[in-house]
């Protein structure tokens, strides 16, 4: 019986260590998710800007995301956790500009930083 308890205890310790190292390996950053609530495909051009002497120096991240109708795109840890000006342009069917604007991202401090947008049926982009 003692051998069985020792094996069980060893397995439990190994499992807890594996979980611990997995937790530590997660990189800190801001996750970006965009939901397309519209019946048409959309292209979103998005950029995160921090501090810098020029736009190029301030640009922390930029991407063009293709979203199928009623689709979703998620990118993990696109930028380090910090304050950003986030600019976006939404194009219906990769051609007609339906919305362009910006939001200010300020970290919440809860270790699960994320920025989520919805593309409405009208083509307007709203922040969740």
Image: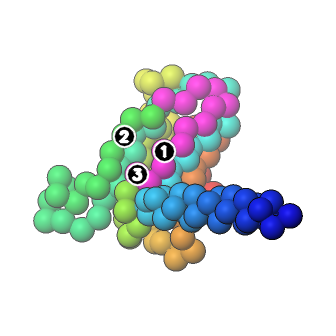
Location of mark 3 (residue): 78
Which colour assignment does the render follow?
rainbow
Q: Is residue 123 left or right of residue 7?
A: left
- Identify which residue, 14 or 83, lies in the foreground: 14
Locate residue 4, reporting x and y percent.
80, 60
Residue 117 visible here: yes
Prevailing secondary structure of the magenta residues: strand
- For marks 3 and 2, give the one nearer the viewer: 3
Asked if the residue under mark 1 is in contact with the one under mark 3, i.e. CB atoms within 8 Å, the reply is yes
Q: Which mark is residue 75?
A: 1
Locate residue 20, reporting x and y percent.
56, 65
Q: CA distance from mark 3 to mark 2?
A: 10 Å
Q: Secondary structure at mark 2?
A: strand
Name the residue: 48% across, 58% down: 26
Name the residue: 30% across, 59% down: 49
Location of mark 2 (residue): 63
Residue 19 visible here: no
- Identify which residue, 42 or 33, lies in the foreground: 33
Q: Earlier in the sequence, mark 2 or mark 1?
A: 2
Q: CA distance from mark 3 to mark 1?
A: 6 Å
């Amino acid at each position: 019986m003692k051998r069985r308890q020792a094996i069980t205890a060893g397995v439990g310790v190994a499992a807890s260590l594996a979980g611990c190292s997995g937790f530590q390996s997660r990189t800190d950053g801001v996750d970006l998710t965009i939901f397309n609530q519209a019946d048409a495909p959309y292209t979103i051009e998005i950029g995160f800007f921090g501090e810098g002497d020029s736009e190029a120096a301030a640009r922390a991240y930029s991407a063009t995301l293709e979203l199928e109708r009623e689709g979703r795109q998620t990118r993990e840890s696109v930028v380090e956790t910090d304050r950003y000006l986030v600019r976006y342009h939404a194009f219906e069917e990769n051609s007609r500009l339906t919305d362009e604007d910006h939001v200010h991202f300020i970290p919440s401090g809860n270790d699960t930083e994320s920025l989520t947008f919805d593309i409405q049926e009208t083509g307007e982009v709203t922040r969740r």
